[in-house]
Image (cartoon, helix red, strand yellow):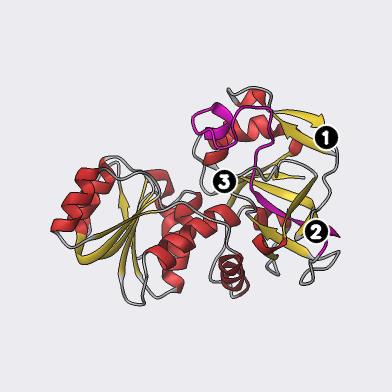
């Protein structure tokens, strides 16, 4: 099979096409013929050596997949050959999604949502599960609450806005000037241009903040949260910020996304109910994985995908 490998850490040019043996599914696994593989910021960080999740190269990047079940490992009874599936298997271990085939745990994938193709389904799992787990599992989001979502036009942010709206929340969202219209189209109730306005001056009585920036964004977000509110951060939160949060009776959750079949099913239901749509900025062929990584670094609206 063809796969994108890297033999050293570095820039996008370290990603090259190579032939690799077809993997065989072990007990509890299925072999998936991958129709598309999503690309996420964590992929670029691992490629560059900034986030050594996979150790030293050589390795194959990628976690987001959508494809068709090609073979079943021993003991798999709830999937069949030919089923269309999607998911984020093995994260943060190697899933080797930048390839034509991958052997993955059956319990970490779910039926692909009806009505969307593999490119859009592959764009959903990691970003969608991050948003879902942040808002629902860690944030305890409830109908009628006021939610502030930072970087609302990004991969996680644009899905978080829609999930929060589907849950009946009042959504405030930050974005850059060129992305304000897109964020409004997602259903955000209030949109803040972070290059012109300070969100601290615009947001009030917030129940839940989803912070995708880290740094002083986390500490400054405490100023807009009400007592009993929740700050969910995708990045590390300083001890000083945690201490300040305790003084104001604010709960701080530092989260990392996990494989979650139940969460995938819920995302699929929202997709099929047309309450959630994943925006794909651009698909690239497998051979252009390096170009896809370079494009992602320009911070486009939505997601970047390898169409395999």
Q: Is residue 210 visible?
A: yes
| 160 in relation to 166, above or below | above
Q: Determine whether, in the image, residue 32 is placed left or right of residue 305.
A: right
Residue 147 horizontal/vertical position (percent):
32, 64
Q: Quadrant of residue 225?
A: bottom left
Q: Quadrant of residue 145?
A: bottom left
Residue occupied by mark 1: 20
Residue 54 horizontal/vertical position (percent):
60, 36
Secondary structure category for the residue under label 3: loop
Asked if residue 293 lies in the magenta stretch, the reply is no
Q: Are marks 2 and 3 in contact (CB under 8 Å)?
A: no
Q: At 23% from the left edge and 58% from the top edge, which residue is drawn? A: 203
Q: Is residue 185 visible?
A: no
Cα separation, mark 2 vs mark 1, equals: 19 Å
Q: Determine whether, in the image, residue 150 is placed left or right of residue 220.
A: right
Residue 69 horizontal/vertical position (percent):
81, 60
Residue occupied by mark 2: 68
- Image quadrant holding the N terminus, namely top right
| 291 in relation to 71, above or below | above
Q: Which mark is residue 92?
A: 3
Secondary structure category for the residue under label 1: loop
| 20 in relation to 218, above or below | above
């Amino acid at each position: 099979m063809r796969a994108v490998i890297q033999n050293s850490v570095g820039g996008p040019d370290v990603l090259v096409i190579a032939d690799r043996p077809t993997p065989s599914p072990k007990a509890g696994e299925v072999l998936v013929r991958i129709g598309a593989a999503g690309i996420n910021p964590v992929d670029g960080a691992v490629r560059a050596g900034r986030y050594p999740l996979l150790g030293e190269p050589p390795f194959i990047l990628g976690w987001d997949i959508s494809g068709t079940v090609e073979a079943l490992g021993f003991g798999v009874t709830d999937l069949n050959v030919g089923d269309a599936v999607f998911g984020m298997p093995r994260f943060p271990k190697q899933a080797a999604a930048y390839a034509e085939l991958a052997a993955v745990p059956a319990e970490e994938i779910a039926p692909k949502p009806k009505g969307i193709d593999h490119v859009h389904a592959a764009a959903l799992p990691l970003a969608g599960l991050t948003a879902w787990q942040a808002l629902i599992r860690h944030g305890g989001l409830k109908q009628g609450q006021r939610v502030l979502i930072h970087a609302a036009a990004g991969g996680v942010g644009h899905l978080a806005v829609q999930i929060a709206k589907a849950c009946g929340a009042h959504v405030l969202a930050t974005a850059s000037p060129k992305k304000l219209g897109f964020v409004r189209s997602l259903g955000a109730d209030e949109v803040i241009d972070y290059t012109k306005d300070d969100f601290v001056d615009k947001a009030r009585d917030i129940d839940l903040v989803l912070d995708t920036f880290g740094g002083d964004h986390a500490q400054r977000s405490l100023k807009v949260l009400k007592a009993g509110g929740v700050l969910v951060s995708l990045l590390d939160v300083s001890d000083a910020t945690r201490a300040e949060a305790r003084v104001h009776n604010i709960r701080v959750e530092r989260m990392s996304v996990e494989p979650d079949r139940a969460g995938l099913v819920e995302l699929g239901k929202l997709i099929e109910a047309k309450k959630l749509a994943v925006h794909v900025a651009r698909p690239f062929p497998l051979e252009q994985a390096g170009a896809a990584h370079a494009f992602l670094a320009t911070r486009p609206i939505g997601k970047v995908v390898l169409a395999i």
